[in-house]
């Protein structure tokens, strides 16, 4: 099993980030294959934050759902990202044209906040 050490910017609401990491670690696709470990001391295979890093993978922090600036009802946009002829979608504050998913060592959207967006709405329609 691959253990991925994840470092992150401590300015986020850590409980929301941990919620997403817990979901990923217990997803049937990840079990026995990959485990995301939040370890600020070990140095990261993956860095989630504001400032790009040279080593490892960098995921830029959108700083929206994981901060106090989130405002319910504010318009959000679905943006498209292409990788190997597959389109991936994000939830973001600003609209963008189709973009490559990966540039160098950087993933070009905040995948953690996008996952949080979907998870936080997962049961909202069940009783309708």
Image (cartoon, grey):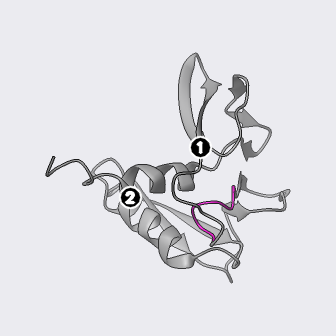
> In the rendered structure, which disc, 2 or 1, sits on the residue that comes first in sequence?
1
Would residue 92 appear left or right of 103 to someone viewing this image? left
Please tell me whether the stretch drawn in magenta is mainly helix, strand or loop: loop
Would residue 82 appear left or right of 27 to someone viewing this image? right
- Furthest residue in direction top, as rendered: 85
- Residue at 55% x, 23% y: name it: 87
- Furthest residue in direction front, as rendered: 73
Query: Percent position (x, y) of residue 55?
Result: 80, 58
- Residue at 72% x, 26% y: name it: 99
Is 64 a magenta residue? yes
Front disc: 2 or 1: 1
Query: Percent position (x, y) of residue 7?
Result: 66, 71
Q: Is residue 9 above or below residue 1?
A: below
Say if mark 2 contacts mark 1, CB within 8 Å: no
Q: Which of 44 and 20 is in front in this view?
A: 20
Circle 1 residue:
75
- Residue at 63% x, 50% y: name it: 110
Q: Distance between the residues labelled 2 and 1?
A: 17 Å
Circle 2 residue:
120
Query: Percent position (x, y) of residue 49?
Result: 73, 64
| Quadrant housing residue 45 | bottom right
Q: Considering the numbered disc 2 on the image, is that residue within a helix, a strand or a loop?
A: helix
Q: Give the range drawn in magenta.
A: 62-67
């Amino acid at each position: 099993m691959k253990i991925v050490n994840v470092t992150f910017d401590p300015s986020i609401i850590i409980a929301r980030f941990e919620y997403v990491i817990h979901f990923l670690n217990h997803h049937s696709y990840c079990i026995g294959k990959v485990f995301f470990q939040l370890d600020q001391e070990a140095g990261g295979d993956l860095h989630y934050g504001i400032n790009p890093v040279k080593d490892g993978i960098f995921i830029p922090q959108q700083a929206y759902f994981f901060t106090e600036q989130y405002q319910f009802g504010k318009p959000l946009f679905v943006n498209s990202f292409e990788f190997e002829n597959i389109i991936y979608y994000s939830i973001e504050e600003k609209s963008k044209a189709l973009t490559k998913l990966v540039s160098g060592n950087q993933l070009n959207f905040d995948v953690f906040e996008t996952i949080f967006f979907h998870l936080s709405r997962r049961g909202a329609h069940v009783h309708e």
